[in-house]
Image (cartoon, rainbow, N blue to C red):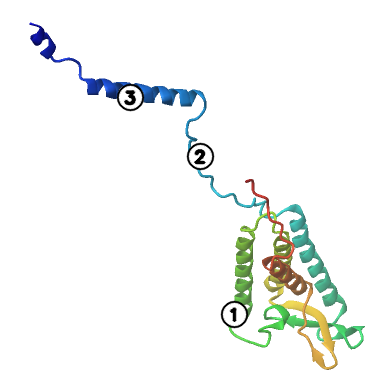
Amino acid sequence: MDDIIDASPGPDRGAQSRGSDEIQAEQAGGSGEEHGLHAPEPQPAHAPEHAPRGPFVRPFELFLIGGVVLFDQLTKLTVRLTLPLHESRHIIPSLLDFTHVQNTGAAFGLLNAADFPYKSAVMIVIAALALVAISLYARQLGTHEQLSRYGLALILGGAFGNLIDRALSGYVVDFVDVYWGDAHFWAFNIADAAITMGAVLVLLEMLGLGRRHASHPV
């Protein structure tokens, strides 16, 4: 009888051992969580921050554009009223004259000598397309790109000033004649000068002069 009792199957000692191991592991994990030893959760990746972009045209830039157009038109009107066509007035001897000329080409007299059908209309279309391209580029500028924004404001003012002449008269009035001896630079006007200064400012921005980078949080 005792042999029968001893031979009866008892609880699986391997299963008991595995069960105790699992209990100990759970207790160890629980105690680790209680003491703050759990592994840190992965943080979501942050998208790179971009420099802030301001409005398309800020008040001072709008003032620059309007000021260039107004000054350009006033000087051209003064030349029309006071200086006959092709006449000159000495301002600085052997260096600077005011000479009334009519330019049917591009800035600084480019393409002035060229003659082709619908030249006035073609030049107006080219000027309008240039204004659109400049405006699209200006929309990409951030608030920290000060030189480029001011430069493009000068370029837009000059382009508008010359476009007004082409639309109303079919030509642009040039009058600034810079020369040395017998060598004369191309005659130009206030709009051309503004376009040139604006292009220089944009170039300086591209070279990194005056650029202020926005700080990024770490």
The answer to whether 5 appears left or right of 123 in the picture is left
Mark 2 and mark 3 in contact (Cβ < 8 Å)? no
Which residue occupies the foreground of this view, 56 or 32?
32
**Residue sitting at x 9%, y 10%:** 3
- Pinpoint residue 80: horizontal percent, then vertical percent: 82, 76
Relative to the observer, which residue lies in front, 2 or 109? 2
At a point 62% along the width and 62% down the height, the residue shown is: 137
Q: Amino acid at mark 2?
A: Gln
> In the figure, is residue 115 to the left or right of 91?
left
Q: Residue furthest top?
A: 1
Which numbered disc covers residue 58? Answer: none
Residue situated in front as seen by the camera: 106 or 93: 93
**Residue 202, relative to residue 91: is it above or below?**
above
1 and 2 marks in contact (CB < 8 Å): no
Dot in front, 3 or 2: 3
**Residue 84 image-quadrant placement:** bottom right
Residue 21 shows which numbered tag?
Answer: 3
Q: CA distance from mark 1 to mark 2?
A: 64 Å
Q: Is residue 168 left or right of residue 81?
A: left
Element under disc 1:
loop
N-term-proximal mark, 3 vs 2: 3
Q: CA distance from mark 1 to mark 3?
A: 95 Å
> Residue 32: where, in percent of width, then height?
47, 26
Looking at the picture, which amino acid does disc 1 mark?
A: Tyr
Q: Position of residue 82 (x, y in %)?
A: 88, 77
Outermost residue on the front side: it is 2
On screen, residue 151 versus residue 30, left or right, reads right
> Percent position (x, y) of residue 191?
76, 71
Residue at the disc numbered 2:
43
- Tell me the tag on residue 118: 1
